[in-house]
Image: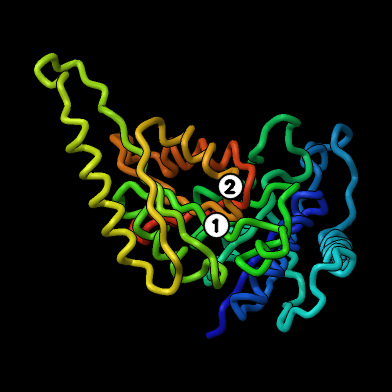
Amino acid sequence: MGRTVVVGLDGSGGSIRALHWAAAAAQRMDATLQPVFAWEYPALALLPFPAGLPVPPQEAMQADAEVRAQGLVESAGALDGLDAVAEPLVLQGTPGRVLCDAAASADLLVIGSRGLGSVKGVLLGSVSAHCANAAPCPVVIVPEDAPDEVGAEGAADGEGTGLVLVGFDGSASSDAAVKWAAQWAPEGSVLLLMHVWNVPITTDASALTFDVEAMDDAAKRLLDAAADLVTDHEVETLRVRGDARMELQRRSEDADLVVIGARGHSMFERFLMGSVASHTVHHLSKPTVVVRAPSDRSPE
């Protein structure tokens, strides 16, 4: 079965930018691009008459949504030269659930960071947050001002750096993130594997003295093991002492793409997305891939 890249459309600038990014990624991955458009009845239409609004029948709304979806794809100008594009998949339902269902057998789900109806000032919309937590495949969240996907060739033309930043902490999710980057990063990219460590916070007075050098050595061993997972790209490693959320955000400014695991080492294992991943996608400035370990994937 061939590869598939699913992209969410809603007519917003963010979703159009995601379509451009997904088209470039599908071309590079030799994959079929599958646009997906979700529609819902207006909230007021669910209220009883006379408070509720009259709405057209389901068939009419479905037909209208299909026309809108096709128009968005054709007007975006993102598909020139793309070998395989499926007809837009138009489904009734909440966008997050529709996209996750459509991505059930996909290799990648691409969405904009904010869609229609998002609150100004909130970098991650509710649909993006839902998909980052619940999608059955890796999710790429694309900022509205992001360029089309670029790799080493684009970097040579001044369009990007050719750098893919991968956060790694030794967890199963971060291990999956490295493997994803090793397989799917643009040809010629440099993979920068980054591990951020810090002295643990403890109330145990007997443990207040930590061997900082030993902790740094442990970080180096982790990164060396991660680098061994990459065979087809140039690899650089970086270990930094500090706050993982702040350091990933700061270092991402120099990257074309950021790849992170959905959950790292944490005492809060019930949380679907860890604090580092959550902070990163809520403050992203570059396209960011969220990868979860197979055992972490949500059934929803």
Residue 254 is tagged as 2
Taking the image as shown, residue 169 lies to the left or right of residue 118, namely left
Say whether residue 268 is visible. yes
> Disc 1 to disc 2, how far (Cα)?
7 Å
The vertical placement of 299 against 3, above or below, is above
Residue shown at 76% from the left, 70% from the top: 88
Question: Are the residues tagged 1 and 2 within 8 Å (C-beta)?
Answer: yes
- The quarter holding residue 209 reads top left
Q: Secondary structure at mark 2?
A: helix
Q: Position of residue 161 (x, y in %)?
A: 61, 56
Q: Position of residue 55 (x, y in %)?
A: 88, 49
The image position of residue 178, as x and y in percent, is: 40, 60
Q: Amino acid at mark 1?
A: Leu
Image height of 245 relative to 221, above or below: above
Q: Crowding near pointer 2: few (<14 within 10 Å), some, many (20+)?
A: some
Q: Quadrant of residue 97?
A: bottom right
**Circle 1 sits on which residue?**
163
Image side of residue 146 versus residue 254, left or right: right
Residue situated furthest left in the rendering: 206
One can see residue 94 in this view = no
